[in-house]
Amino acid sequence: MPVAQLVRQKAAQSVANELITNQDSLTLLKNLFRTSISTICHFRGLLPPECFEECTVAGLHISMLVPNAHPDIDKLNSWLQDGVFDALKKNYLRKVVLGIYTRTDPEKLVESYTFRVTLVHGQPTLTLGSDTQEKSQEEPQVDPRTRAKDATVTMLRSLIGQTQEMAPLGLKEWRMRMKIYYIRGAVPDGYTPQNFVSSRSKSDDEFDFDHISVGDIDTPYHDMTVTVARAGDKASDVKASGRRGKGTTAKAKSVPKAGKSRSVKRVGRR
């Protein structure tokens, strides 16, 4: 690679890393998890109205879960803090699935929301070679913060639209379960977050339904994509066996519907 190209590449990488740090990236993803799950709970009617408060996120009006307003909110926050965020910080996290199940058949999945995270290791890839590519790299770089903010707004708008347009759950009682999938080989033996149990069973959340893309966000450190699937959106040409998760899986206890029986099924080791 010519010296001039190498200098430009290093300069571009330096600018990107100065504008958005690894901590900024982690904070962005944490906030996106919180706002996304609040949006899902609000528009899918999983918790009563008094459990939410109106907030503005990047110019969008979002109904956020109110801490300590309901035992189920405390459980969700615990799942995020002790399970998702700890794995994210330690670079273990590969995927998070929030599933809604029927209470009469706790293994029957009705809807799922999948968050996939990919590590980029702080090295944004810049392709330099042809004259056209060289010229494009000499132009002012897009501010990574602006790009991440725009992508966040786009993703949240899409999630709001999807959850509003979906047919009502039609369930009087339901269970909620969160599963965390780790990067194979990254997790030390015996690592199990509080309120989760280890499981190596097949992925029953990766069923043969269409997964609708909500959007994606990329920073110099992480890529994140979000998809939605619902039992009524079965696709005959998609096979569940082709989408089974690999690696360690952690399943959280189920959250019963607000105001219903507090019996909780603990997912045992298989």
Image (tube, grey):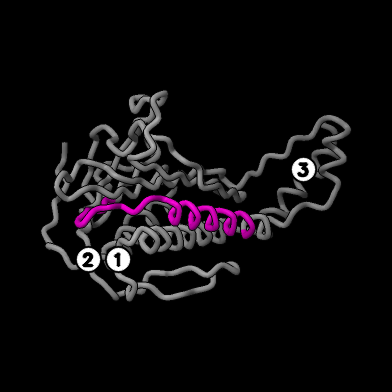
- Which residue is rendered at x = 18% and y = 45% of the image? 106
Task: In the rendered view, tell whether residue 215 sits above or below residue 241.
Answer: below
Percent across and percent down for residue 58 are 59, 67
Q: Is residue 49 visible?
A: yes
Residue designated by label 1? 47
Residue 188 lies left or right of residue 123; in this view the side is left
- 3 vs 1, front mark: 1
Percent across and percent down for residue 158 are 53, 53
Residue designated by label 3? 9
Corner quadrant of residue 36:
bottom left
**Mark 3–mark 1 distance (CA, rounded to whole Å):** 49 Å
Which amino acid does the dot numbered 2 rest on? Ala
Residue designated by label 2? 258
Magenta-colored span: 149-177
Count of number-bearing discs: 3
- Which image quarter holds the N terminus? top right
Percent across and percent down for residue 100 are 28, 50
The disc, 3 or 1, on the residue closer to the chain's N-terminal end is: 3
The disc, 2 or 3, on the residue closer to the chain's N-terminal end is: 3
Which amino acid does the dot numbered 3 rest on? Gln
**Mark 1–mark 2 distance (CA, rounded to whole Å):** 6 Å
The disc, 1 or 2, on the residue closer to the chain's N-terminal end is: 1
Label at residue 267: none
Which amino acid does the dot numbered 1 rest on? Leu
Residue 183 lies left or right of residue 254; in this view the side is right
Percent across and percent down for residue 104 are 14, 47
Crowding near pointer 2: few (<14 within 10 Å), some, many (20+)? some
Secondary structure state at the residue bearing disc 2? loop
Query: CB of mark 1 within 8 Å of CB of mark 2?
Result: yes
Residue 63 lies left or right of residue 246; in this view the side is right
- Which image quarter holds the C terminus? top left
Secondary structure state at the residue bearing disc 3? helix
